[in-house]
Amino acid sequence: MAPMTDAALARRGRWMYELGRARWASRILLVLLPLLVVARLIGRPAFLVLALGGVLVTAGFVLSMLHDRYARAVRIGALAGIPAFLLPLLIRSFDLIPLGAIAGTAIDPCVPASFLSGVAAGWLVSRRAADEDHLLSFWAVAVAITALTGTLGCSVAGGGGVVGMIAGVVAGSTPVALSLATQRH
């Protein structure tokens, strides 16, 4: 066997390093893939799960591979999105609040549920982002992952549920962001 040159050794070392990073980043799939399986098991359309799930898994893996900060943001975003993922589905599945029971209107109860779960998710993501050195990038990644995770469930109420959830995330994170902005100056 021929002796290994410095260039070949460097290439091999870099390859092993990148494989290690990919292996480390793939841990996030243990969080994201079960969410997609649950979404499919509870009756979400296959196209929706495939489309949103593909974006969610790809973004989660790639961002986790970029930096540990983004891996933390993906985990927090996915966990913060679970209430937005489940609450509208639970309300619809168990008929907890019948359609039109809110002040005699025809409002789908999943829309306010999506908003409230979005508020909780936005607050959680913002509180966690406050502990990070790179607040804005952490927050942006976590909110994007929260939105993707929550959309899998909030879409049960149609576009109104998704818009409600996103508005809730903004409403939940704005007070925390404003207080952080005033504290840093």
Image (cartoon, helix red, strand yellow):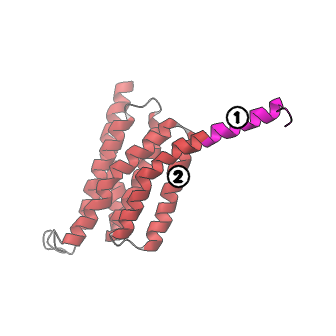
Magenta segment: does it hold 135? no
User: What is the quadrant of residue 95 in the picture?
Assistant: bottom left
Tell me which amino acid carries mark 1.
Gly
Q: Is residue 109 visible?
A: no
| Residue corresponding to mark 2 | 59
Q: Residue furthest front?
A: 1
Residue visible at 44% across and 34% down in the picture: 135
Marks 2, 1: nearer the viewer: 1
Label total for image: 2
**Mark 2 Cα-neighbour bin, 10 Å: few <14, some 14–19, many ≥20:** some
Q: Is residue 79 above or below residue 115?
A: above
Tell me which residue sits at (75%, 37%) in the image: 11
Report the predominant secondary structure element of the magenta stretch: helix
The N terminus: image quadrant: top right
Q: Quadrant of residue 127?
A: top left
Magenta span = 1-19
Residue 39 coordinates in the image, percent (x, y): 37, 65
Q: CA distance from mark 2 to mark 1?
A: 26 Å
* Quarter of image, res 48: bottom left
Residue under label 1: 13
Residue 72 percent coordinates (x, y):
43, 40
- SS under mark 2: helix
Quadrant where the C terminus sits is top left
Few, some or many residues within 10 Å of mark 1 (<14, 14–19, 20+): few
Taking the magenta stretch, the answer to whether it contains residue 18 is yes
